[in-house]
Image (cartoon, rainbow, N blue to C red):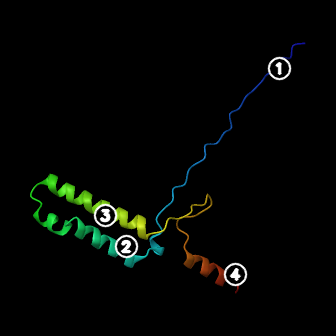
Amino acid sequence: SDHRCINTVLNLDVPSVERESRLQWRKADWAAYCGLVEKGWEALDLYKRAETAGTRQELDVVVQDMTNVLTQAAEAAVPLSKPSPFAKRWWTSELTAQQRTLKHL
């Protein structure tokens, strides 16, 4: 016969995209956050160091310390989201409430 078998192998593995947890700033404990920032800045004497930084390198070190304090406070006082593959970043709880109101009309 003049027909030959053709074998085709398809690699259809779709790489999964890891969704990163985000900080939920709307649900932040602002009192705790501000307290942690204040304590961190006082502990590192950042107010005085920022005022007396004489060189660019000194100022860069102060800014890095400030950033670290802010990051640590956020990790402690701001909850992380549990990302869903179907989540829409722009959707808020207010929109959910409005949607329910509209459905009941």
Which class describes the residues within 10 Å of circle 1: few (<14), some (14-19), or many (20+)?
few
| Picture residue at 16% right of the left edge, 64% below the top | 50
Give the distance between the C-alpha atoms of the residues marked 2 and 4, in whole angstroms.
38 Å
- Find residue 104 and report its image quarter: bottom right
Amino acid type of disc 1?
Cys
Instruction: Name which residue type carries label 3.
Output: Val
Whole-percent x and y of residue 44?
Answer: 22, 64
Along the polypeptide, which appears first: circle 2 or circle 3? 2
Q: Secondary structure at mark 2?
A: helix
Q: Which mark is residue 103?
A: 4
Disc 2 packing (10 Å; few <14; some 14–19; many ≥20) = some
In-front residue for pair 80/4: 80
The mark lying in front, picked from 1 and 3, is 3
- The Cα–Cα distance between marks 4 and 3, rounded to whole angstroms, is 45 Å
Q: From the viewer's perspective, tell me whether residue 7 is left or right of residue 51.
A: right
Q: Residue at x 14, y 68 (%)?
A: 48
Judge depth for marks 4 and 3 and give the one in front: 3
Quadrant of the rendering where the N terminus is positioned: top right
Give the side of residue 69 with respect to residue 50, left or right.
Answer: right
